[in-house]
Amino acid sequence: MGRYTGSVCRLCRRSGEKLMLKGSRCLTPKCALDSRGKPPGQRLGRPRRVSDRGLQLREKQKARYTYAILERQFKRLFKEAERQLGITGENLLVLLERRLDNVVYRLGFADSRAQARQLVQHGHIMLNGRKTDIPSCLVKEGDTISWRQESTKTEYYKQLVQSIEAKSILNWLGLDRQKLVGQILSLPTLEDIDTKFEGQTIVEYYSR
């Protein structure tokens, strides 16, 4: 199965929450969840009660939609979270946050994770001084994220330099706003992650 290429607004409507899949557009009146809040598809008769299994699936899908990854990738991260010490649900959220495309988004280099993924795949981003075009690469404490020298000449970069001052950065990240160089100060904790889903519910989904 390939990557989802349909309207991401349908994913928000299906989840019933704003997953910020279109960045700042989600905060404007153009947001489809505000104008068309009902789930997509036909609705015949009374809505059915969602089972516990359905609620667990919904939480798992919200996590997948938020970080824009496929089921196979998501399950691989879940197995990695299970192998680590600590609480599996929290480990999973930390692993998702450590993805390079997510860090590029968190640093304010992109308005959405989809845009951040594109920046990484097109070779604009450097990890520890080396060009990295793998969005799923996991960063670690002490890593630096910067722009490729050739990419600093693009119009997008010039606009970003002007707008980056207005963007807030999470506590586990550092950012030189003049040079647009980010650093991983520490690994994220559960308090640092503003998720819209429950990690423990995802664990219950895969435990059945």
Image (cartoon, rainbow, N blue to C red):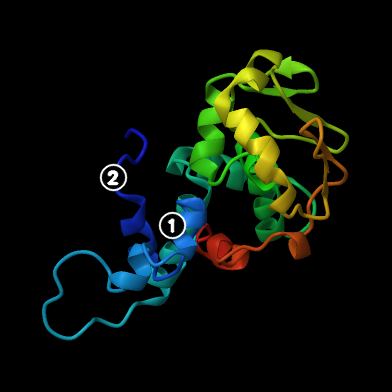
Q: Position of residue 8 (x, y in %)?
A: 36, 51
Pick the front one: 52 or 31: 31
Instruction: Indicate left or right for 134 with 4 as reference.
Output: right
Q: In the drawing, what numbered circle is on residue 6?
A: 2
Q: Residue furthest bottom?
A: 46
Q: Name which residue lies at 54% across and 43% down.
A: 113
Pick the front one: 18 or 93: 18
Q: In the drawing, what numbered circle is on residue 156?
A: none
Residue picked out by circle 1: 61
* Residue 184 location, quadrant: top right
Q: Residue furthest left?
A: 44
Q: Nearer the viewer, mark 2 or mark 1?
A: 2
Q: Name which residue lies at 70% across and 34% down.
A: 138
Instruction: Indicate left or right for 47 with 75 as reference.
Output: left
Q: Amino acid at mark 2?
A: Gly
> Could you tell me which quadrant the N terminus lies in?
top left
Query: What element does badge 1 sit on?
Result: helix
Q: Name which residue lies at 45% across and 56% down.
A: 25
Can the viewer see residue 103?
A: no
Q: Position of residue 38 (x, y in %)?
A: 27, 73
**Is 189 above or below relative to 99?**
below
Q: Amino acid at mark 1?
A: Gln
Q: Are marks 2 and 1 in contact (CB under 8 Å)?
A: no
Query: What element does badge 2 sit on?
Result: loop
Instruction: Indicate left or right for 41 with 169 as reference.
Output: left
